[in-house]
Amino acid sequence: MSALPPDVVPGSMLARYWDAPVSRLVEPPTHQISVDEAERLTIASLVVMALIDGYWNGNKSGALGRYPWRENQRVEDGRYAGDALGDRYLGHNIACIAVDENGSILDFEFNHNEIFNSSAEHAEARLIRRLFLLNQSYNDWQRFDAEQAEFVKYGNTMNGVTIYTSLESCAQCSGMMTLAACGRVVYLQTDPGQYRVGNILYNLSKPPPASTTHPTVVARPHPAPKYWAPEPMAAAAFGFGPMEELDRAYLAFVAGVQSDPTSRYFFESPGGKRDQSSSITSFLCTDAARAVYSRAASALASLSLAQPDYRPPRSDGQREGVRSNGEMLDHARRFVRHALVEARRGTPHH
C-alpha cells in the first residue's frame, strides 16, 4: 500500500479506497427489493415520468427550424409543439419528486437552466431548496400551543426522504442531497456523463445498512455522521422497464447522430446552422424519449397492484400514518393532477 498523503485520515473510507481500483469505488450498492416494496418504488417513479410527459417541451433550440429526431412533435404550421405553458423552453425534460417514509409526495421540481440562464437550476437542487423553505413555512401555527412546538434542526429535515429523479444526478445535486441528508435517491435513467459520482460519494461515506424493517426507506441515524451521501438506486433494481428503454434509446440516438451527422443532426436553424449535439439533454427532446414517458404516464393511470393492502413500517417500526400501496397509488394520481393543473411548473407550490 502506498503512503497516504498527510491530509488523508488513516482508517477513513478514503484511506480504505486509496489503493483500490476505480471499479470498486464506483460499484453500486446491492438491493434486495420485494414485490410489495417494488410496487411503491414503481408508483413514485411513474409519477416523475407522468409529470415530464405532462410538461413535455422539446424546443431546446426554439420552436422553428428542423429537428430530425422530433418529427412526431411537429404541428401543422411547421412549428414544433411546446407544452401547456407555451413554446418557450424553460429547461430540460428532467424532473424529480420527494417522498417521505409515509408514502406521501412532498413536492416536485423541474430543471430550469434555460429560463434562469444558469447551470445551477437542476431539478434536484431546486427541490432541495424548496423543501427547506417549506420546512420553515409552517402554516398551522394557530392550531396548536406554540409552547409545544418542536424545533427540527435542518440536518434532520430530510430524514427518511427519498428523491426520485428522472436522470442520474450530477456532482452538484449529489452534493446538495448529501448536505441535505437525504436517505436515498432513485434515478430512472443512466447519465454516462456524470461518471457515477453518486456511487462514489456513497461508497466514501458508507452509511449504516438500510432499515431491516423497511428496506425501501433509508433513514439517517441519530446522531448522523457528517456528510452521509444518499444511497443511489437505479430503477432497474426493482425491474422498472422504462429505465432500460431510455438507456437503450439514448445509445441509439448517440450512434445515429455520430454516424450520420448530415441528415441525423439534432437541429437545423431556419438559417441553416446545424447543432450536431448528441447530449443526453438533446436526447430528452426526441420522439423516442417522449414515447417512453407517454407510455409511463398511461401506465400510472391504469396501474393494477398485486399488493394494494401492503403497509410497510417506517424506519422507527411504526405503521400508523403510513399509506398502503393502494392509498399511495390514489395519492400519486391525485398529486399528478394537482401538479399539472394547479401547481404549475416553476411556481411556488406545495
Image (cartoon, rainbow, N blue to C red):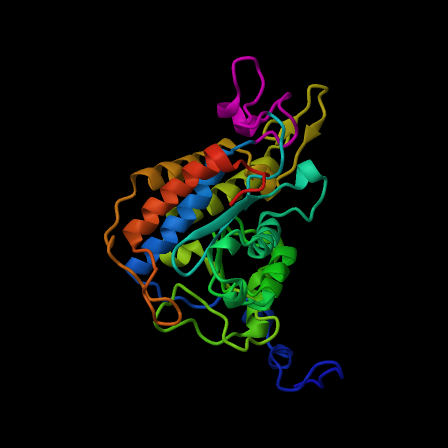
Is residue 80 located in the magenta-colored stretch of the structure? yes
- Relative to 304, say whether 311 is above or below: below
- Relative to 296, say whether 106 is above or below: below
Say whether residue 63 is left or right of residue 214: right
- Relative to 70, say whether 45 is above or below: below
Percent across and percent down for residue 122 are 62, 48
Q: Quadrant of residue 57?
A: top right
In the displayed orientation, state which residue is furthest to the top: 77
Mainly helix, strand or loop, the magenta region?
Answer: loop
Closer to the camera in the image, 53 or 256: 53
- Relative to 79, say whether 320 is above or below: below
Say whether residue 49 is left or right of residue 64: left
Percent across and percent down for residue 45 are 42, 49
Is residue 78 located in the magenta-colored stretch of the structure? yes
Closer to the camera in the image, 346 or 37: 346
Say whether residue 68 is left or right of residue 209: right
Residue 288 in view here: no
Closer to the camera in the image, 194 or 339: 339
Percent across and percent down for residue 193 are 62, 52
Residue 36 in view here: yes
Quarter of the image for the N terminus: give it: bottom right
Say whether residue 50 is left or right of residue 146: left
Specify the segment rendered in magenta: 58-86
Task: Give the mark count.
Answer: 0
In the displayed orientation, state which residue is furthest to the right: 6
